[in-house]
Image: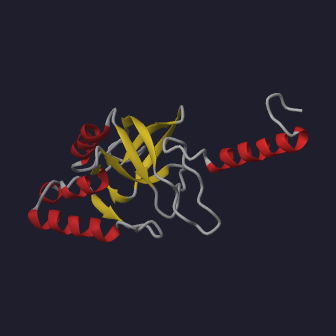
């Protein structure tokens, strides 16, 4: 019999079942680590995370539930600054610096699309900092181009519209590169 639980074995099994359900479900805590979606491929619940550092213009390192994870922004591609074997690309340092200003040390909300991780094991997310859609701000400011990789395309049309406007205005990399 489990101390403090009425019903002997049946009560203990019920408690164990509830605890197992909560563990597998992720506890329902918005700050909890992201869970894989259901068998139907449903989207994952958004999570809050603290940004440990911006790695470059389109990748950050975050702390979730006491562990760190890299997050690759969905739908955007900034010029390279830290890719091994690649030279620093035009407007890459500016994109990286802008991303640092937007998210370093901030608590962000990560919103997932169809796939949770990329082939490198990074989380894939739309990132929101203080209500601002970071992915969109990178495009709007000319710090990034759109990068549409199906099936993660929930915001593709919105980002493409912002890219067109930035390009027409010659903003950021569109005027410098």
Which of the 4 image quarters holds residue 158?
bottom left
Q: Position of residue 168 (x, y in %)?
A: 12, 68
Q: Position of residue 96 (x, y in %)?
A: 28, 42
Residue 156 in the figure: left or right of residue 125: left
Q: Position of residue 99 (x, y in %)?
A: 28, 43
Residue 161 in the figure: left or right of residue 35: left
Total numbered labels: 0
Q: Quadrant of the C terminus?
A: bottom left
Residue nearest the viewer, comparing 92 with 143: 143
Q: Which residue occupies 44% across, 38% down?
A: 62
Identity of the residue furthest to the front in this view: 6
Q: Which residue occupies 9% across, 63% down?
A: 169
Residue 169 in the figure: left or right of residue 62: left
Q: Position of residue 50 (x, y in %)?
A: 41, 36
Identity of the residue furthest to the left in this view: 169
Say if 102 sits above or below 115 in the image.
Answer: above
């Amino acid at each position: 019999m489990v101390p403090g639980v009425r019903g002997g074995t049946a009560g203990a099994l019920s408690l164990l079942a509830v605890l197992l359900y909560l563990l597998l479900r992720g506890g329902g805590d918005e700050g909890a680590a992201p869970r894989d979606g259901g068998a139907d491929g449903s989207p994952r619940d958004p999570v809050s995370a603290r940004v440990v550092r911006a790695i470059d213009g389109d990748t950050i390192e975050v702390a979730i539930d006491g562990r760190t994870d890299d997050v690759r922004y969905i739908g955007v591609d900034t010029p390279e600054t830290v890719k091994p074997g690649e030279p620093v690309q035009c407007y890459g340092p500016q994109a990286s610096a802008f991303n640092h200003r937007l998210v370093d040390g901030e608590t962000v909300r990560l919103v997932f699309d169809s796939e949770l991780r990329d082939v490198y094991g990074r989380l894939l997310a739309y990132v929101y900092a203080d209500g601002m859609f970071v992915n969109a701000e990178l495009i709007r400011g000319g710090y990034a181009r759109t990068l549409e990789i199906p099936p993660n395309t929930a915001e593709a049309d919105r980002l493409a519209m912002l890219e067109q406007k930035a390009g027409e205005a010659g903003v950021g990399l569109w005027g410098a590169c």
